[in-house]
C-alpha cells in the first residue's frame, strides 16, 4: 500500500495533464469551428463543457500536489493519494468525453487528438487500482481509522 501511496499522485498528475489538454484542444476547436455562422465557442453548452474542464484541471492539480507533498514530507495519508487518483481519473474521463462532444463527429476519429485522450483517460480509471477500489480505500480509511 505504501508503494501505491507514492505512485497514485503521479497518476493524478497525468490526469491533470489530460484534462488540461482536453480543455486546450476544445478551446482551439470551438473557436475555429463554425455552426450557423458563428464559432461554436459562443454556444453556452460548449462554454459550460469547457468551464467544467478548467475547473476539473484546477481541482485535480491541487489534489495531486497535496498528495505528493504528503509523500515528500512522510505524512502517511493513503486517503489523499486515493482521492487524487480516483477523482483525477474520473474527471479526466469526463473531460475527455466532453472534449469528444465538443468535436462532434470528428471527436472519435484518429484524425483529432481527443480520441486518444479519451483512451488515455480510461486507462487512468483502471491502472494502479480502479476508481471503484479507490472508493473502497477511501471509505475504509474514513470509517474504520481515526
Image: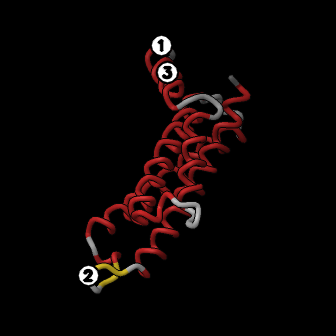
Q: Quick one: SS at disc 3?
A: helix
Q: Which dot, 1 or 3, sits closer to the camera?
A: 3
Residue located at (60% from left, 28% from top): 129
- Which one is in front, 118 or 4? 118
Residue 38 appears left or right of 111: left
Instruction: Judge depth for marks 2 and 1 and give the one in front.
Output: 2
Could you say which disc has been placed on residue 144 in the image?
A: 1
Residue at the far bottom in the pictured view: 37
Mark 1: secondary structure: helix
Give the spatial CA distance, label 2 vs label 1: 56 Å
Pointer 1: residues within 10 angstroms few (<14), some, or many (20+)? Answer: few
Q: Residue 26: where, in percent of width, then height?
A: 46, 68
Find numbered disc 2 in the image and state the secondary structure of the residue it sits on.
Answer: loop
Q: Distance between the residues labelled 1 and 3?
A: 12 Å
Residue drawn at x 47%, y 26% is 135
Residue at x 59% of width, y 41% of height: 124
140 in relation to 59, above or below = above
| Crowd tier of the residue under label 3, counting other residues whose Cα lies within 10 Å: few below 14, some 14–19, many 20 or above | few
State which quadrant residue 128 falls in.
top right
Colour scheme of the rendered structure: secondary structure
Residue with the mark numbered 2: 36
Query: Residue 77, percent across and down?
Result: 60, 30
Mark identifier at residue 30: none
Residue underneath mark 3? 136
Q: In which quarter of the image is the N terminus?
A: top right
Ranked by sequence position, the earlier of labels 2 and 1 is 2
Q: Earlier in the sequence, mark 1 or mark 3?
A: 3
Amino acid at each position: 500500500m505504501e508503494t501505491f501511496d507514492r505512485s497514485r499522485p503521479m497518476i493524478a498528475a497525468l490526469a491533470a495533464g489530460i484534462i488540461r489538454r482536453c480543455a486546450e484542444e476544445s478551446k482551439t476547436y470551438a473557436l475555429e469551428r463554425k455552426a450557423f455562422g458563428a464559432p461554436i465557442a459562443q454556444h453556452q453548452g460548449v462554454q459550460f463543457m469547457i468551464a467544467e474542464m478548467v475547473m476539473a484541471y484546477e481541482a485535480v492539480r491541487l489534489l495531486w500536489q497535496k498528495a505528493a507533498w504528503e509523500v515528500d514530507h512522510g505524512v502517511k495519508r493513503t486517503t489523499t493519494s486515493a482521492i487524487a487518483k480516483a477523482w483525477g481519473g474520473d474527471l479526466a474521463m469526463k473531460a475527455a468525453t466532453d472534449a469528444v462532444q465538443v468535436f462532434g463527429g470528428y471527436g472519435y476519429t484518429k484524425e483529432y487528438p481527443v480520441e486518444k485522450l479519451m483512451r488515455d483517460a480510461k486507462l487512468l480509471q483502471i491502472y494502479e487500482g480502479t476508481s471503484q477500489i479507490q472508493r473502497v480505500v477511501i471509505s475504509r480509511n474514513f470509517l474504520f481509522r481515526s
